[in-house]
Image (cartoon, grey):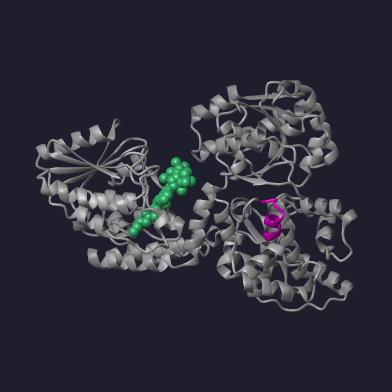
Amino acid sequence: MTLYYEKHGDVAVLAADNPPVNALGQAVRGGLQDGLLRAIGEGALAVLILGRGRTWFAGADIREFGKPRVAPFLPDVCNRIEASPIPVIAAIHGTALGGGLEVALSCHYRLAVPGAKLGLPEVSLGIIPGAGGTQRLPRLTGYEEAIAMISGGRPIPASKALALGLVDRIEEGDPMELGLQYARELLARNAPTRPVSALPPPAPVDFEAAKAQVTRKARGQLSPVAAVDAIAASARMPFFDGLAEERRIFRELMETDQREGLIHAFFAERQVAKLPELNDVSPRPLDMIGVIGGGTMGAGIATAALLARLRVTLVEIDTDALDSARKRIAGNLSGALRRGKISQSHHDEVLSDALSLATGYDALTDADVIIEAVFEDMAIKKQVFAKLEAIAKPGAVLASNTSYLDIDEIAASTSRAPDVIGLHFFSPAHVMRLLEVVVGHQSAADVTATGFALGKRLGKVSVRSGVCDGFIGNRILFAYRTCADHMVLDGASPYQIDRALEAFGFPMGPFAVADLAGLDIGWANRKRLAPDRDPRERVPRYADQLCEGGHFGQKTGRGYYIHDGRTRQENPDVLPLIEAERADLGLSPRAFTDDEITRRYMAAMVNEAARVVEEGIARRPLDVDMVLLMGYGFPRYHGGPLKWADMQGLPGLLEDIHRFAEADDFFWQPSDLLMKLVAQGRVFDDLNKEQTP
Ligand code: 3H9
């Protein structure tokens, strides 16, 4: 039973019970429709709609998307609720999202409990509201707010919903009791039905200007822009014509790769922490976190833990360094306060009680998890772990935040290898949502589970990675960055490459990203890898020359670009360096189209990603997708590199790689997994499905 019908005097209660989120699957829709008819048939005077469990309806059942549609359809259910001859009341708790809010908008009266959240997040799934949301919401809130809510997709708290007229009242208590009381009050004053569709559309706004603004922000994503079109229809058409227009746009978006990519990302985000090796494994305690190193990374990790209300002890080498670390953390926390992420009292409490700073490792004897974020050098890391071994309590998890180095080698330098793990945060660590949990060959299962539990506590998306140089993300980055360097040597400019990839949907192209991260990082890495480099590798010199000139990107104001605040301009010194290098190498530059740039860059990314899966470094293709989406700016609406590859067609990609290999068969070696999938006529997503627990 997914929808309960109960009679409470004159009021019929329809209560959904479809855990976990009361999604509006076929049975729930059918139950709502039948319950309404039954209530009217039995002579009820009002209907109250509720969600049992943790929430009101969180939306249409996304699992039904892409399958044959089964009646009754949600728009019809909503229209029937609105057309009811007796008042229908929504009592909202938890989340009223998407189709869930559309059901509420079809009710005649709405009450919410204080913690409720309301929203139309469909654009984040690549679609728009399809059951009247774009036509009913503006009639209550006006166009400006409706455009913000629908094109932005972010839910709003009940208090804001009240201010906007989206709910009629907020009351603390049990939604069923509150709803029944509200229904009786309405009956006592003979309150009429109150269809939102009968309201006139609000005063129109400049929809073209609104659309232009949304287009700029959407960076190639279709749904937020299409949402403005659907909302605008409500200003020029009668209600039911507007509904038909909304439906037309909804259906069109349903057929797009963007919808498929975004829904893949939605489920992958929830799938990524589900690993058979963690079934029935309990994490170790994680109340007290130790952080070694108070630079940008260490301070960011400490901030992330403090924001999650964990106790933190940070260790630095001397009082000056501690002072700088304290300032960094305080700066991060006041940023969080400014952005409304924490309250003033949480902010003050954290600084006065939850954070301790010390210069000696002895302060870490009580820590449950100790994360080192010291300089990226194996010898230094080993010294740190030797000291940790001496002071950490038995069972403490010893973690390294290294972004490249071999966790197994670090673990082997202690006698506690099973306690050692990599926790690779991304900078700024209190903002970026990705955490790579790097599992060494000897890491204990409950240590891995603790890594995931910590990630969850910090609100991160944690991805399991095996050990290799650069783990999942930086290893793949290295491959596509190398491809970009080759294209520069062969004739493309860094600026054309950045423009082409920004048009693909990345917020920044690879050269702008390098400037942001600091060119010295790549420089150090090239030096580290130089001794073992294969002579066939093509490594450009011009990037080193920029660094030798003291130009490290944004932090020095000059790199590939000249930076002035948030604006960037091409650095005129860069192209001459590149031209000189091409001349030295005897290369005559050729023209690249933007399309070729994107195809090569993506082929390099997909090929390396496939190898990462083939070698078991990532357990599933979706793990790679999450890493690139969460940590590397990959456009979410393409679903991640391997989902994108599936949608493009793997045979075409493999053909590209074979063709590129004709000129450079050292770099362009197709992955065995990619070749196998093509030969079998399968796609990466088939591997995700095979491994879904
Ligand atoms: C829509 O409504 C279209 C209409 O306009 C028009 C129709 C004609 N369906 O996130 P959690 C699953 S589009 C199916 O971990 P939380 C989820 O996969 C929809 N399943 O919990 C997970 O499963 P599992 C608009 C869903 O507490 C489990 O529920 N609505 C759906 O962190 C728990 O989810 C949205 O976009 C769904 N709609 O967050 C809302 N939602 O345990 C999407 C969740 O097997 N949902 N599941 O991994 C959310 O934003 C969050 O799930 C929510 C709860 C905030 C509700």
The residue under the point 68% across, 74% down is 656
Query: On the picture, is 395 further left or further right than 434?
Result: right
Q: Which quadrant holds residue 238? A: bottom left
Q: Position of residue 65 (x, y in %)?
A: 41, 59
Quarter the N terminus occupies: top left
Work out whether residue 89 or residue 499 is closer to the camera in this orientation and state it.
89
Residue 570 visible in image: no
Q: Position of residue 672 (x, y in %)?
A: 72, 64
Residues drawn in magenta: 610-618
Q: Position of residue 294 (x, y in %)?
A: 71, 34
Query: On the picture, is 287 further left or further right than 134?
Result: right
Work out whether residue 546 or residue 498 is closer to the camera in this orientation and state it.
498
Does the segment drawn in magenta span residue 646? no
Q: Position of residue 187 (x, y in %)?
A: 11, 39
Residue 282 visible in image: yes
Q: In the rendered image of this protein, does residue 377 appear above or below residue 603?
A: above
The residue under the point 87% across, 61% down is 534
Work out whether residue 211 or residue 593 is closer to the camera in this orientation and state it.
593
The residue under the point 88% across, 72% down is 585
Query: On the picture, is 682 further left or further right than 109?
Result: right
Q: Which quadrant holds residue 551? A: bottom right
Q: In the rendered image of this protein, does residue 85 appear above or below residue 91?
A: below
Counting labels gives: 0
